[in-house]
Amino acid sequence: MFDKLAWIRLPRNVVVGHGVIDETAAAIDEVHLGGTPLIVTSPTPRRIAGERVAEQFEASVTVTVETASFAAVERVIEAARAEEVDFLVGVGGGKAIDIAKMASDELGMGFVSVPTAASHDGIVSGRGSVPEGDTRHSVAAEPPLAVVADTEIIADAPWRLTTAGCADIISNYTAVRDWELAHRLKNVEYSEYAGALSQMTAEMLVGNADSIKPGLEESAWIVVKALVSSGVAMSIAGSSRPASGAEHLISHQLDRIAPGAALHGHQVGVASVVTEYLHSGSAGRWRNVRDALADIGAPTTADELGITAEDFVEAMTTAHEIRDRYTILGDGVSREAAVEAATVTGVI
Ligand SMILES: NC(=O)C1=CN([C@@H]2O[C@H](COP(=O)(O)OP(=O)(O)OC[C@H]3O[C@@H](n4cnc5c(N)ncnc54)[C@H](OP(=O)(O)O)[C@@H]3O)[C@@H](O)[C@H]2O)C=CC1
Ligand SMILES: O=C(CO)COP(=O)(O)O
Ligand SMILES: [Zn+2]
């Protein structure tokens, strides 16, 4: 008798390359999804990619969403039922993809991810994040059956979206440290395989920092591959643990305290500078994290995020409350300790 249930849900077809958007229907066919797709997109991605995806099918339905909300997920579910579609395709950044992912989960329908920006690892994962009440963190949702990432489109997206994706990957270092800590102190289940994959993904991205530059299509390749790998680590773990530790808790808290101030990846990157400091002290590796962010042009200070020192410190001191996830924040860092960590690291 097994006392453990392993449940790893991964994409079956990951297509990455120049111009592959025009192969979306073929990639979908390969995973045996047939019939009419419901394309979930947002205004800019619709113009750039959504229409090119739609024209590959005899019939399709498109829903354009403007904001990430449960109302938008409901609208997509209603459209899918009313139009009797067979599967969902999310075309865009995290907003369109997560709305499609959450709706697919509810509908029990196949889901395909067509990212137009490499802004964070949610574009390839089985985790969905749509703000609900006070909740900002991800929940389990339908993983994509196929991912179609056109590097020509992604390389043309605003550069800040790509640096945000890089910073989300760089934050894997501290996420894994938090996970190991929770394993040691709280007996939280830890997967060495998922932890090693997540850490290696960050190392490879940092090792390739010289090739991550605006206007260079190879950057999109490197970042998408890292996001896929991070998504796989989360699938193996069955949670976002390998890619989300205290730095993510701080970012989720910033989303409440200073909504819309900065991109997810940029926030978790800056937060990981201070959480690395909390882990290893002033002589530790926080400078490596900061320098890795600076090398790819991501923010390294609260000011660059457009967040005040006061708000950043408040997020640090309250972030432990938002989720049952043990990290270096323990049962809360004091205001003095938060100010010290953020000041020594130059974050505030
Ligand atoms: N599942 C997970 O684990 C995670 C999910 N998230 C979720 O993801 C969302 C944030 O993702 P993010 O990608 O930053 O947000 P969006 O999907 O809102 O995209 C960011 C902006 O980029 C625009 N855009 C997208 N692609 C292109 C392109 N190729 N060229 C020009 N502009 C483009 C969008 O246009 P437009 O305004 O027209 O949409 C939007 O203005 C949030 O809803 C968040 O909750 C965040 C982290 C993790
Ligand atoms: O953003 C994520 C991983 O990079 C998902 O993490 P959360 O579960 O904390 O939302
Ligand atoms: Zn993240």
Image: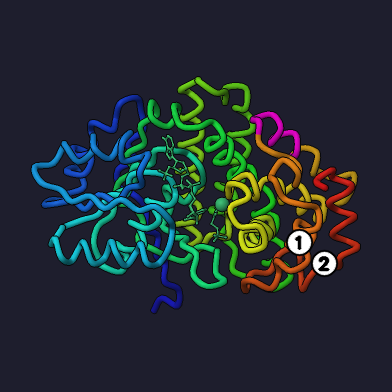
Residue 250: in magenta span:
no
The residue where tag 2 is placed is 333
Residue sitting at x 51%, y 26%: 219
Q: Residue 165, image x and y in percent?
A: 54, 41
Front in this rendered view, residue 105 or 160: 160
Front in this rendered view, residue 195 or 80: 80
Residue sitting at x 23%, y 33%: 23
Mark 2 and mark 1 in contact? Answer it, CB < 8 Å.
Answer: yes
Front in this rendered view, residue 276 or 4: 276
Question: Horizontal placement of 250 versus 85: left or right?
Answer: right
Colour convention: rainbow
Residue 290: in magenta span:
yes
- Above or below residue 57? Residue 82 is below
> Element at badge 1?
helix
Question: Horizontal placement of 186 versus 36: left or right?
Answer: right
Looking at numbered disc 2 in the image, what kind of residue is underneath it?
Val
- Above or below residue 118? Residue 274 is below
Disc marking residue 123? none
Q: Residue 136, image x and y in percent?
A: 55, 64
Front in this rendered view, residue 26 or 235: 26
Residue sitting at x 58%, y 55%: 242
Residue sitting at x 67%, y 45%: 269
The residue where tag 1 is placed is 316
Sequence-first tag of 2 and 1: 1
Looking at numbered disc 1 in the image, what kind of residue is underneath it?
Met
Question: Horizontal placement of 297 versus 135: left or right?
Answer: right
Residues rendered magenta in the picture: 289-297
- Above or below residue 119? Residue 65 is below
